Image (cartoon, rainbow, N blue to C red):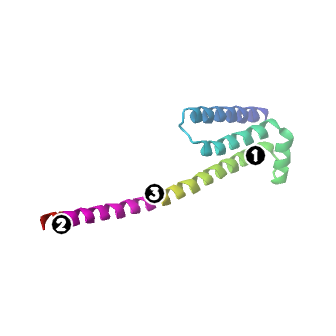
Amino acid sequence: MNHLLNLVTAFSIVLMAIVLISLRRSHIRVEYSVSWLGAAATLLLLARWRAALDWLTRALGLSDPATGLIMIVFCVFLGVFYRFSVIISDLKDANIAMAQRVAILEYRIEALNEKQQTLEHS
């Protein structure tokens, strides 16, 4: 069990470092980095605070803390992935609306150009 906790600790520290480096280099936006930092902090907290992990494992009805930790890790990252799915859906909707507005503007520009050409030829 201690080996697994040490592995999760190392993973969470590496994840935090990667997110902070990416944030510093502007590879990730601040609002997205918060989710990843929160997930990494949760993992670090559970890996280092054994009493909390034992309590959560019992609350989930499990007898093995390693199984509880893996289940909690899965749930934490599932929450992060869900959040990003919502963000991607919002961005897709905004992209569609923007493409429609651009198409309308292009149509109006073409109509004005045709009208101007008609007036010039008259």
Residue receiving disc 2: 119
Give the residue displayed 81% in from the left and 45% down from the top: 64
Residue receiving disc 1: 67
The kind of residue on which mark 1 rests is Thr
In contact (CB < 8 Å): disc 2 and disc 1:
no
Does residue 46 show up magenta in the picture? no
Q: Could you tell me which secondary element the residue under label 2 belongs to?
A: helix
The kind of residue on which mark 3 rests is Asn
Residue receiving disc 3: 95
The kind of residue on which mark 2 rests is Leu
The residues bearing labels 1 and 3 have C-alpha atoms spaced at a distance of: 41 Å
- Residue 115: x and y in percent read 22, 66
Q: Could you tell me which secondary element the residue under label 1 belongs to?
A: helix
- Residue 2: x and y in percent read 79, 33
Query: In the rendered image, which quarter is residue 116 located in?
Result: bottom left
- Residue 107: x and y in percent read 30, 64
Give the residue displayed 70% in from the left and 43% down from the top: 38
Task: State the extent of the magenta-drawn residues as a range.
Answer: 95-116
